[in-house]
Image: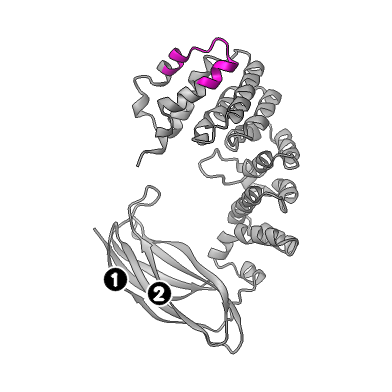
Amino acid sequence: MSALKDIYSLSFYNLFADVAETVLPSFDRKKFTKDIFNSDWHNKELKQRMRHTSIVLNQFLHVDFSKAAKQIEKITLKLQQSKTNENVFGFMFLPDYIEIYGLNHFKASLNAIEIVTQFVSCEYAVRPFILKYKEDMMKQMFAWSKHKNHHVRRLASEGSRPRLPWAMGIPELKQKPKQILPLLENLKNDSSEYVRRSVANNLNDIAKDHPAIVLEIANKWRGISNETNALIKHGSRTLLKQGNIKILKHFGLSNNSKFEITDIKVITPKVKIGKDLMFTFTVRNGSNKEQLFRLEYAIHYLRQNGQLSKKVFKISERTFKPNEKTSITKKQSFRIITTRKFYTGQQKLSIILNGHERATEKFILKL
């Protein structure tokens, strides 16, 4: 399986060069390719290759950024017209170019961003502009939230996320997220699921620092439409995993439910790194009436400092009939991944019903 950074291949750059030659009369394909694949190319990771491409491209664009931005717009439109659907992610160097060279050219940059984001998302590129031109940028994001194109509308939400992954931080949005809410109001019932999921992710970011704000929005938006209800649920996922009593109540998940967890068993009490933890248990509605339940499990991972770190995984959410019971078998992978380091020793498994841990078992992780 090839690495993601390998999207930056000779064929990718030849495709780009085919378009660039039609927009930039002095574009030198041979020099462009030579400068891209320099002596340090193989040592560069994904983001480094993207940034390197932006810097190399700058040599072939107009020295006046306002004119260079127009060239970027024309290249983007040509790429769209050529129906370049493969490796669109690789063209992230286009918004990256705007981020590097356009920060002191507000109007020209925003015009270019509005065009480019309809081809490849500019969610990262807008972050430094928000930091430098906060009030003007938030006005622009609000205007974009009403744009006819769904990619631009999504940019308004995604670009203003307080905790956008792998992005430049914007402390003020994290500390004072209410300034984001007017544009989320515009997008809460958007016709595009792509946009609505971004709104949900924005709300989930806000919930991590300001749960009361998201609780207020959940109550305010309740029942607007099925799509908005689903948005609220997705935007509340962190609060649900935390067992927040108010959000559980909002979704009808009672803390006083008469559910029973029995017969919990760790099938693999000793798990090798690279293999799966297997476990089983039975859940029963001990009431004489129907009850809604949300069933999750948590792995309490052993950390390097000897403490346990809890991560919650959803199993299901459904209504149980009176006295209904079911047996559930699950597995959790301990295959090596880049986002988590495993430490050998005693770990813990817990079963969670409606936000509350009801049963726990221990297991050993070993080499």
What colour scheme governs how the chains and residues are painted in the rendered image of this protein?
one colour
Q: Amino acid at mark 2?
A: Thr
Q: Is residue 168 above or below residue 9?
A: below
Residue type, numbered disc 1: Pro
Label 2: which secondary element: strand
The residue range painted magenta reads 18-33
- Asked if 19 appears above or below 302 in the picture, the reply is above
Q: Residue 269's mark?
A: 1
Q: Residue furthest left?
A: 367
Residues under numbered marks 1 and 2 in contact, where contact means CB atoms less than 8 Å apart = no
Q: Which numbered dot is residue 144? A: none
Residue found farthest to the top: 26
Residue of label 2: 360
Task: Indicate left or right for 196 with 12 as reference.
Answer: right
Determine the image quadrant of residue 301. bottom left
Q: How far across and down, in percent of the image, does residue 211 sit? A: 63, 59
Was residue 55 drawn as part of the magenta stretch in this picture? no
- Corner quadrant of residue 19: top right
Q: Nearer the viewer, mark 1 or mark 2?
A: 1
Identity of the residue drawn at 57% across and 46% down? 163
Q: Is residue 90 visible?
A: yes
Mark 1 neighbour class, 10 Å CA radius: few under 14, some 14 to 19, many 20 or more:
some
Badge 2: how crowded within 10 Å, few (<14), some, or many (20+)? some
Nearest to N terminus: mark 1 or mark 2? 1
Q: Residue furthest front?
A: 82
Where does the image place residue 97, in percent across and percent down from the top left? 56, 25
Give the answer, above or below, for where 109 lies relative to 134: above
Asked if one can make out residue 103 in the rendered structure from this viewpoint, the answer is no
In the depicted structure, whether residue 145 falls above or below residue 230: above
